[in-house]
Image (spheres, helix red, strand yellow):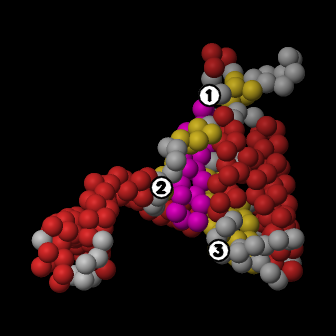
Amino acid sequence: MGERLKRFQARYEPMFTRILLMTIFVVGVTAQFVKPVGDALEDKAFLGGALLSLVGYVLYDSVKDLAASLRLPTRVQVTSPELGSFVSEAFRARTVEIRFLGYTGETLYHELYHRLEGLLDDPGPTRRVSVRFLIPDFGQPMTVPSKVGPDGAPVDDPDFRKNLEQQCQKYDEQLSALAERLTTVGRVTAECEYRLYPGIPRDKICIFNRELVLHGLYDVVARTVGRSSDPEYYDPKGYRTNLNVWSREGNDDAKAVVATWNKHLDDLWILAAVPHWRRVTPP
């Protein structure tokens, strides 16, 4: 019933509004020059009102288009270093839900840490925070990240993977400790958690409050090297990844994209493995 009402309003409200504005204009002009009509309507300032209604009629579509544009993201693509503005906006809500799928989540981690830390002094409207990171299972052999071998062939490097795993473990522990502090204080309930997905880091996805989705593709053949004597590694750089933006406040296609990504990350979370550093060891 509600959806049918929305469709009815979307289809007929513009027509009714135009008819009303034009009717006011016609009646106002008639009342100005036809005395019986003017007397019947108690001699108001008909012409001025009529002209205003005509202006409203002419501008109606422009105002509608402007209102629609204000509901859309001002940009369709952003860079990863701009995540901070999206994190800040998400924390304006009473319930904050942030979902991430990608490589290590380093860029998002730093933005989240400072924002969560700020809640200790000033929680603002926020009362609940839920953060979930889906990262690759660095405990398994991988083609990316990996060492660059002869002719560019990927060569699995357990030590390199181990360093990345320890980096993510540190992020998880620090965010979780901060969430626990917030919850203990009692003004905000917070939880942060990491889980593992199989495969290489290909997609970078951030979802804010289930309403805004940022999605991009890592450069999976990006190479990094330390000292000149060190080998090269296939090591995607998340901060260089451009992200497409979709919002539930956009058109039907954008709403469908947001719904699809929400469901996809929810499903992956159910299937994802708990990292070894979070597993409870039986006594």
- 1 or 3: tag closer to the N-terminus: 3
Q: Residues within 10 Å of mark 1 (few under 14, many from 20)?
A: some
Q: Nearer the viewer, mark 2 or mark 3?
A: 2
Which of the 4 image quarters holds residue 159?
Answer: top right
Secondary structure category for the residue under label 3: strand
Q: Which residues are magenta?
A: 200-220
Q: Name the residue beneath numbered marker 3.
A: 95
Residue at position x 77%, y 68% from top? 279
Element under disc 1: loop
Q: Pointer 1 and pointer 2: residues touching (CB < 8 Å)?
A: no
Q: CA distance from mark 1 to mark 3?
A: 38 Å
**Mark carried by residue 221:** 1
Residue at 59 percent across and 46 percent down: it is 204
Circle 1: residue type? Val
Above or below, 187 relative to 106: below
Using residue 200 as the reference point, say whether residue 123 is left or right of it.
right
The disc, 2 or 3, on the residue closer to the chain's N-terminal end is 2
**Amino acid found under the numbered disc labelled 2:** Leu
Q: Is residue 210 magenta?
A: yes
Please name whichever residue, 235 or 142, is drawn nearer the observer in this view of the structure: 235
Please name the residue that numbered disc 2 is placed on: 70
List x then y, in percent, for residue 19. 18, 67
- The spot of residue 15 in percent (x, y) is 20, 65
